[in-house]
Image (tube, rainbow, N blue to C red):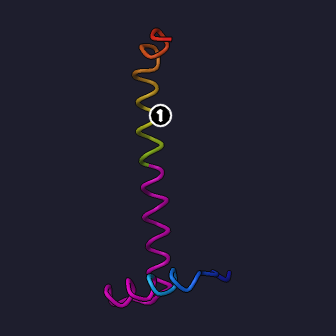
Amino acid sequence: MTLRLTEEEDLALAATAERLGISKQEAARQAIRMFTDERARFEDIVTRAVDRFGPVLDKLK
């Protein structure tokens, strides 16, 4: 797979990788894992909130 970045994105990735002492590839992989983990947590919270408060919100319609 080839990851195409803008110059600005590549500079940010390079700076992050250097600051963390890892390769740009590893920095990108970590960023992807962090994003997908955070997204999954967000979706879980939303699902639980809808399950818990959905009936009350429906009554407000």
Residue 37 located within the stretch drawn in magenta: yes
User: Extreme right residue here?
Assistant: 1
Query: Residue at the top extreme?
Result: 59
Quarter of the figure that contains the N terminus:
bottom right
**Residue 11 location in percent, x, y?**
47, 87
Q: Nearer the viewer, residue 4 or 32?
A: 4
Dominant secondary structure of the residues highlighted in magenta in the image: helix
Image quarter of residue 19: bottom left
- The residue at the point 46 percent across, 27 percent down is 50
Residue 29 percent coordinates (x, y): 49, 76
Identity, as a three-letter code, of the amino acid under mark 1:
Thr
- Magenta stretch? 13-40
Left or right position of 19 against 27: left
Q: Residues within 10 Å of mark 1 (few under 14, many from 20)?
A: few
Image quarter of residue 7: bottom right
Q: Which residue is identified by label 1? A: 47
Residue 61 spot, x, y in % from top left: 51, 11
**How many circles with numbers are drawn on the protein?**
1
Magenta stretch holds residue 57: no
- Give the farthest residue toward the front: 8
Relative to 26, say whether 35 is above or below.
Answer: above
